[in-house]
Amino acid sequence: MTEKPTIIEVRKRIDAIDDNILRLLKERLECALEIGRLKDASSRAKWDPLREREIFSRLLRDNNGVFPENSLYSIFHEIITTCRLSQKNIEVAYLGPEATFTHLAGVEYFGQSATYKPMESIDEVFREVEKGRTAYGIVPVENSIEGAVFSTLDSFMKYNVKICGEIQLPISHNLVCRSGNIEDIQTVASHAQPLAQCRKWLRKNMPNIPTLPVFSTGAAAQMAANNPNIGAIASSLAIKTYALQVVVKGIEDYQGNTTRFLVIGRKSPNRSGNDKTSLLLGLVDRPGALNEVLTILSSKNINLAKIESRPVKGKQWTYLFFLDMIGHIEDPVIEEAANILRRTCAYFEWLGSYPQAEDIEP
């Protein structure tokens, strides 16, 4: 009869496994550095989204569901991102201060190894990227409940940047303050969108407490950290960053609240095999112009994921349209449709082609 191993023996096995994992991580990092040196010699781009997608697909397939898939993805996302950034560390601009949902989305996308640079506005994020002061920026573009983030759409009309990626982040709003006691809160501060997304909960549970819109959830968390009578609606990252206490978790009015963020840079990546292309179009001033654009896409069997109009500043009753199409500009059908639109529209700008977002569980 085989004796059962003791706790000490099993822990020794775990220590040996951990040592082996560490050795392999260092070996993988050295391989990534060597890849970086080879890419420098051939002037190839550091980021290959198709290669990364292939790695994730292979790992999930070989896992056969044994290791929890969301955790497996998170672990290898951090490993792959860390190894890629070792080839050249990057700086990412985001709507600050620390611990905003945009900051959290940046960490989810780029991992912990990137350097994050908080900015006071979305406009400044675009400017930092256009001027080359940061390699990338990350900005919110739409929320599943509140709709488009117009300051982001308007910034695409002002700055010469390209979309490099996207991430969809499930949003859960926490009411926080210094003490953790709801009785201490005399004002609730947050960005206008979280306040709107928690409107019903606040009206029902804190009907006599005024709200204070500020430019970011991180700024609200800072205020709560400095004032015991201010509560904030903030991210889970803000709780750790500003040493706040949770009063109530998940106070959003609707389940499934998700924000889509865009990663902007100077150059879009190559095809990943599961991509999206964004365009900015100005229509010719004639009846049926928008229908003509939609007919062009439909005739090519192109899936239109989003269309949004924005007024052009200083030109009354003139609008530009933002379009998201499924596919990459290097795909023949997308390239052909884009060329037709370029000839048909009064204004045409390719904003970028990039890997579609991976779904992230709350």
Image (cartoon, rainbow, N blue to C red):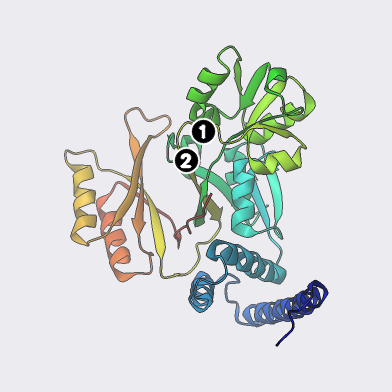
Residue wearing tag 1: 252
Q: Are marks 1 and 2 in contact (CB under 8 Å)?
A: yes
Instruction: Report x, y in % for residue 91.
Output: 69, 55
Q: Residue at coordinates 28% horizontally, 49% vertically from top-left?
A: 345
Q: Residue at coordinates 58% horizontally, 39% vertically from top-left?
A: 122
Question: How dense is the environment of label 2, judged by Cα within 10 Å: few (below 14), some, or many (20 and up)?
Answer: some
- Total label count? 2
- The answer to whether residue 150 of the structure is visible from this angle is yes
Tell me which amino acid carries mark 1. Answer: Glu
Tell me which amino acid carries mark 2. Answer: Asn
Q: Quadrant of residue 215?
A: top right
Asked whether 116 or 107 is in front, the reply is 107
Which mark, residue 180?
Answer: none
Residue wearing tag 2: 257
The extreme front residue here reads 1
Query: Regarding mark 1 in the picture, which secondary structure is present there?
Result: loop
Q: Residue at coordinates 24% horizontally, 56% vertically from top-left?
A: 297
Instruction: Report x, y in % for residue 121.
Output: 61, 36
Instruction: Report x, y in % for residue 160.
Output: 51, 50
Q: Earlier in the sequence, mark 1 or mark 2?
A: 1
